[in-house]
Amino acid sequence: MHFTLPLPTDPLYCPKLTCTVYDFIFRGWNQPIIGVFTLPIGDIMKALREERTEETAAMQDLLKKLKEMVAKPQQKIPSYGGKGETK
């Protein structure tokens, strides 16, 4: 199954997708509903947005430091081997 639709971004209106699974193989004689589950799509979207924001900030910080290193090639680069020495 595949479908595409726009979802709200406001946390107040972020949806939760509830799915009900029915038994059509054995015609549901004993129990027609096999199970029910909920996917918290709004919470997943929020977590992904926060993760992307953190990753973007880390990449921008790395880029800033790399630009500083390129701008000053004579500057010694600290060693990150754990001893705090410079090369």
Image: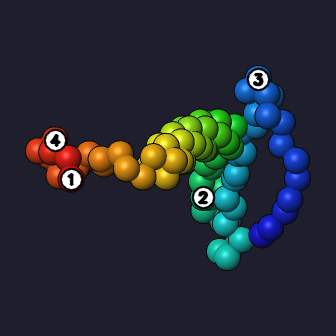
Residue of label 1: 87
> Looking at the image, is mark 3 or mark 2 earlier in the sequence?
3
Q: Which is in the foreground here, disc 3 or disc 2?
A: 3
Q: Are marks 3 and 2 in contact (CB under 8 Å)?
A: no
Distance between mark 3 and mark 4 Cα atoms = 49 Å
State the residue at coordinates (73%, 27%).
Answer: 11
Asked whether the beta carbons under mark 4 and mark 2 sit within 8 Å of each other, the answer is: no
The residue labelled by disc 4 is: 84
Q: Amino acid at mark 4?
A: Gly
Residue 83 falls left or right of residue 48: left
Residue at the bottom extreme?
A: 25
Give the position of the N terminus as an image quadrant.
bottom right
Q: Amino acid at mark 1?
A: Lys
User: As shown in the figure, which amino acid type bears the numbered disc 2?
Assistant: Ile
Mark 3 or 4: in front is 4
The answer to whether any part of residue 79 appears in the image is yes
Dot label at residue 34: 2
